Amino acid sequence: RSTLAAAQQRNRIRFAQTFPADPRAPGVYYQALYQEYQADSFQLAADMALQLRQWTPAAPEDVLQDALVVEAHSYYELSDYARAENAYRQALSRLPESDERRANLRANLAASVYRQGEGKIASGNLAGGVEDLLRIGELVPEAALAASALYEASGYLVELQDWQRVIPLLERLGSEASPEQVHTLTARLALAYRETGQWSSAAAKMETLSRLADSPDDQRRNLLEAAKLYD
């Protein structure tokens, strides 16, 4: 930041803090916090956004909306995904439906939840991570991340042997799966049916796996397993 830019930034902050009741003060302070965001000073930008949201007298609604957006982006850049999620939620609750930023904010909300789940899984909290992955489809069903998060969650639910939850999820995903996912989802569903004593359903999935198999050996093995299940 140049000497002139630094001086301008100090002047913005000094004016806003010295004359908080001036109608221009919230807008000037927002300009200052946005400059910090642009300079990658994300923690400072988030802190300033919080101060602006607590401004007395209250800042105009459009300024508060802009501050929340910057706050959310700042927390995301800081990898503080729980706070980012909260700020994105607040921003979306205040932005009008016609605001062009909503689609991007909803995508970032989904990413914030996904990153929380990813972190929990990496730290060994598999159950907590799965809950976050499942939340994405509820919060932002249109997000590109939603389908992949549900696919990942189904694998972790199998690992957790949570058959009652994974079976309806797998059945739903099977009807929407990409060609690359069909084999894995079918195998997971066959296992879940078998573990819950649904022998005919498990056998039917093994027959499907036989048809999907790449080699004659795999085809025979899956058909043999299907025959055993029918017995």
Image: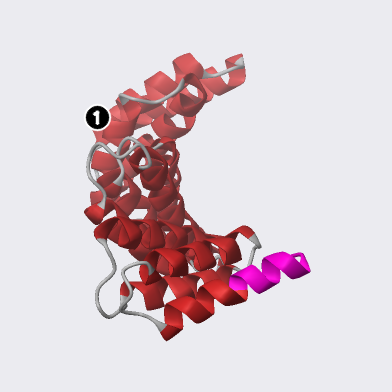
Question: Where is 191 relative to 125, above or below?
Answer: above
Q: Position of residue 171 (x, y in %)?
A: 27, 33
Q: Is residue 34 magenta?
A: no
* Residue 197 in which image quadrant: top left
Q: Residue at x 30, y 24 (%)?
A: 175
Residue bearing mark 1: 200
Task: Report the front residue among 224 and 178.
Answer: 178
* Residue 112 in which image quadrant: bottom left
Judged from the image, the secondary structure of the residue bearing numbered disc 1 is helix
Q: Residue at x 25, y 50 (%)?
A: 165
Left or right of residue 167: residue 208: right
Left or right of residue 161: residue 2: right
Q: Please, what is the three-letter code of the amino acid marked with disc 1?
A: Ser
Left or right of residue 121: residue 141: left
* Residue 50 in which image quadrant: bottom left
Q: Position of residue 46 (x, y in %)?
A: 48, 71
The secondary structure that dominates the magenta segment is: helix
Q: Residue at x 36, y 30 (%)?
A: 228
Magenta stretch, residue numbers: 1-9
The image's colouring method is: secondary structure
Q: Is residue 6 magenta?
A: yes
How crowded pointer 1 is (Cα within 10 Å; few <14, some 14-19, many 20+) is rated as: some
Please say whether residue 103 is visible from this viewpoint: yes
Question: Where is 129 relative to 215, above or below?
Answer: below
Work out which quarter of the rendered image holds the N terminus and state it: bottom right
Q: Position of residue 134 (x, y in %)?
A: 33, 51
Work out which quarter of the rendered image holds the C terminus and state it: top left
